[in-house]
Amino acid sequence: MDKEQFVINDFKNPFLGDDAAVVKDQVFSKDLFFEGTHFKREWMSLDEIGYKAMVVNFSDTIAMNAKPKFVLLGLGLPSSIKSSEILELNGGIKRACDEFGAKIIGGDTIKSDKIFISVSVIGELCSKPLLRSAVKNGDLIAYTGKLGSSLKTLNALLRTPKNGFRAGRKSRFFTPILRDKFLYKSAKFLNSAMDISDGLEQDLPKLCKSAKISYKFLKKPLKYELRSGEEYEVLFSFAPKNLAVIRKMAAKCRTKVKIIAKAVKGRCRNNVRKHHF
Amino acid sequence: MDKEQFVINDFKNPFLGDDAAVVKDQVFSKDLFFEGTHFKREWMSLDEIGYKAMVVNFSDTIAMNAKPKFVLLGLGLPSSIKSSEILELNGGIKRACDEFGAKIIGGDTIKSDKIFISVSVIGELCSKPLLRSAVKNGDLIAYTGKLGSSLKTLNALLRTPKNGFRAGRKSRFFTPILRDKFLYKSAKFLNSAMDISDGLEQDLPKLCKSAKISYKFLKKPLKYELRSGEEYEVLFSFAPKNLAVIRKMAAKCRTKVKIIAKAVKGRCRNNVRKHHF
């Protein structure tokens, strides 16, 4: 049983199904970031853990074409954690908030065996929300940046966990890079967007299924390109007539854009096994 | 070290310090509800756990004089949990949402050794927010309902955990009763309010400290009255001239009101040991 999908289905309502829920000019999203499930202490510093927990949440807000404004922060901390460690974790959290202009306005802190961070973000829409369901037949489908480094780092860490800190610190796995500037600039020329958190082979079918449409790859993607999750690049679609202006904006923001597929009529199937629990 | 206070101090900002953060006409709050820390499986049914996790959060929103509108729900579920158990938990969650007119608009579900529920509530202010800092010198301080049953139940459960289900199910410990009707009706005659979650001996000093004021008991409270947490009755203050109208409204809502103290000038001390972790 896919418990996440089971819960989503049980709470079915028109707000669910995107990176964030849209209510008037606001978007609301929530993500949980858990030791053991999403990170290991030996892999990352507490500053990196705090920073990543926040930006992966901001990533959802940004993919909707909204700016993260307010944050509710839930922390689970082990009894044994030192003040200096809490300050380091908080340091990463604050750094991310400062960078994206968000304010922490409330939260809760409790004792927990493992560290966990529960983040709720309240965002303000810049203009129209970019919904997954708005992919149109004939749209070009593209993503920002380069995919693969996150999975490569994860595999290296799984092989030699103790060497976590020796892995290249520039990997997206440690420090995701969000494409907020490109997204806000180009939003009016896009039809849909979402962030790549589970990997292209999961997220592309998700995008198209929402829109009751299918896709055709222009060229078969590479294994790392397909399977690398936690990339937080933006997957988006747009009418072919907007290609030139999108390329121009991408160049202005120094953001690479790779066109990978075309939206076509049909029913989208996702045969990839998900990591159920 | 009180880690919760340490975290609050480190994130110090003008939004913190009340049951919920006020931004324009909205209030935002978040609470974590954890197996082991806040409840034990043998004490309560999953339906009761789901219901309580929600209403203790709505309690914060209501104490601010706001209506809970939207909920972001984070669930941690063990791998071994059955579909029927998830449905029972969700049943309690939905029941609470229906009762208070709130909608679940998003969330996250992950694997966790123990059940946890992270709830963020977005509320809409009915009129002015009821802030803790607004207690005025000379105010009468009162609470709704009757305090003590929650601690009595907790003590009974701690003595004989296996007998959890034999304890009286009407205890506030299992099913908190919120005073939303009374609060919304009387809000304009109140100066301040908060809910009683940690017990009167913790919460009354909290209220007065926020307002940089002290208090004097009219009559020494009983031990159970002082120490019983998780009551979710409303602690509030008001100018003595409003006493008659407040009594009238309380009678209309069939809500007992007990006046316990008077706000006086001075520095409020809280010498009660908190349960640090």
Image (cartoon, coloured by chain):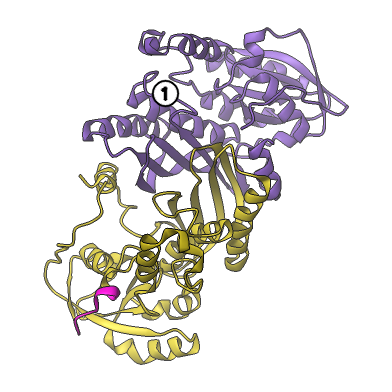
Chain colours: A yellow, B purple
Task: Look at the magenta stretch and give its main secondary structure.
Answer: loop
Q: Quadrant of the C terminus of chain B?
A: top right
> Against B112, is B43 above or below?
above
Q: Give the residue displayed 40% in from the left and 72% down from the top.
A: A233
Segment tinted magenta in the rendering: A218-225
Q: Give the residue displayed 58% in from the left and 63% down from the top.
A: A96
In the image, taking residue B90 as reference, residue A91 lies left or right, namely right
Q: Quadrant of the N terminus of chain B?
A: top right
Q: To which residue does mark 1 refer?
A: B40
In the image, taking residue B196 as reference, residue B218 lies left or right, namely right
Is residue A150 visible in the rendered image? The answer is yes
Instruction: Pick whichever, B134 or A95, lies toward us.
Output: A95
Which residue of the protein is positioned furthest toward the left in this rendering? Answer: A266
The kind of residue tagged 1 is Lys
Residue B102 lies in quadrant: top left
Residue B132 percent across, percent down from the top left? 70, 34
Is residue A25 visible in the rendered image? The answer is no
Using the image, name the chain to which the residue with label 1 belongs: B
Residue B88 percent across, percent down from the top left? 28, 29
